[in-house]
Amino acid sequence: MRFLTIPELQKSVLEFYVSRGWTRERVPLRSRILHLLEEAGELAGVVKYAEHNEFASADFEAELADVVLLAVACANEQGVDLGEIVWRKLRNNKRKYPAARGAE
Ligand SMILES: [Mg+2]
């Protein structure tokens, strides 16, 4: 199993998009965001009628990966360091939602 760092992931996704001509000049950010929402809908579809988290994990993983890939593509298009913004947001969320006593 190969594990990617976030910068490696961003670079791989960028190479995938550029090699197919899906550049920011040809595909507007609006289209990528709509595609991201479409993939999020597909992810929701996997679990929509699931009882007690019983659903095909392969389907869940595939749709979750689609969501992440589209999010990475959006970050790339905007020149955003995904690791930095996610870390910053997590730090803010820790302040906003303090851990319950004894849970940390
Ligand atoms: Mg999908």
Image: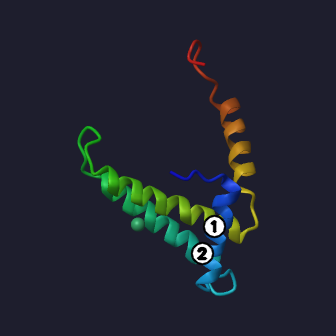
Q: Is residue 83 left or right of residue 35?
A: right
Residue position for label 1:
12
- The residue located at (57%, 73%) in the rendering is 32
Image point (59%, 75%), residue name: 16
Badge 2 density bin: few <14, some 14–19, many ≥20, Cα 10 Å: few
Residue 89 lies, with reference to residue 44, above or below; the image says above
Q: Position of residue 31 (x, y in %)?
A: 56, 77
Q: Is residue 69 visible?
A: yes
- Residue at (29% x, 52% y) in the render: 48
Q: Amino acid at mark 2?
A: Phe
Quadrant placement of the C terminus: top right
The image's mark for residue 79 is: none
Q: Picture coordinates of residue 38 (x, y %)?
A: 44, 68
Disc 1: CA contacts within 10 A as few (<14), some (14-19) or many (>=20): some
Q: Please name the residue that numbered disc 2 is placed on.
A: 16
Mark 2 residue element: helix
- Exactly how many numbered labels are in the figure? 2
Residue 52 picture quarter: top left
Assess whether mark 2 and mark 1 are in contact (beta carbons under 8 angstroms): yes
Image-based side of 84 in relation to 60, left or right: right
Question: Taking the image as four quarters, which one is ligand 1 found in?
Answer: bottom left
